[in-house]
Amino acid sequence: MALSDKDKQRINLMNPVSNDLKLGDKLAELEENAGGDIDAYTKSEADSKFQPKGNYASKDDSYTKTESDNKYQEKGTYATKAELDAAIEDLQEQIDALGGDGS
């Protein structure tokens, strides 16, 4: 479906950035250079494929930042391989000291 002049104008005026970029004109140009329709979703396809604007999880269905911070490991605080190897070695020494074979 080719973009009509009305479609181009509507897209251009959707928001200031679209207007500054003349987004509707650029889409029409892409469509023309592609030899017809460009591979993009129609509004109805996008509406059925993506979450509706403003239809987000309620406050009760999500964690607060504090709950999330308490529930999950802090970003970037990961054990290195050397630290893990040292911890395993320490545990093995404790097992050996108790007379166990570690199995």
Image (cartoon, helix red, strand yellow):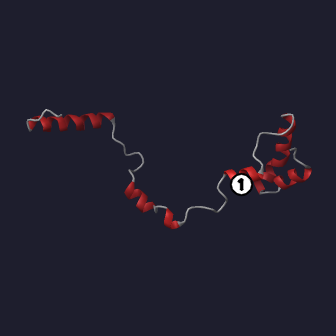
- Which image quarter is the C terminus in? top left
Where is residue 60? Give x, y as percent: 49, 67
Where is residue 45? Give x, y as percent: 74, 50
> Number of labelled discs?
1
Left or right: where 81 falls relative to 87: right
Where is residue 87? Give x, y as percent: 23, 38
Note whether 77 is above or below 82 in the view shown.
below
Note whether 78 is above or below 101 in the view shown.
below
| Residue at figure coordinates x 18%, y 38% from the top left | 91
What secondary structure is marked by label 1? helix
Q: Is residue 63 visible?
A: yes
Q: Which residue is mark 1?
A: 47
The crowding category of the residue bearing disc 1, from other C-alpha atoms within 10 Å (few below 14, some 14 to 19, many at least 20), is: few
Where is residue 39? Give x, y as percent: 77, 39
Q: Residue furthest right?
A: 5
Left or right: where 51 falls relative to 86: right
| Amino acid type for the residue under numbered disc 1 | Asp
Note whether 62 is above or below 34 in the view shown.
below
**Of 77 and 27, which appears nearest the observer?**
27
- Which image quarter is the N terminus in? top right
**Of 29 and 99, which appears nearest the observer?**
99
| Residue at figure coordinates x 75%, y 46% from the top left | 41
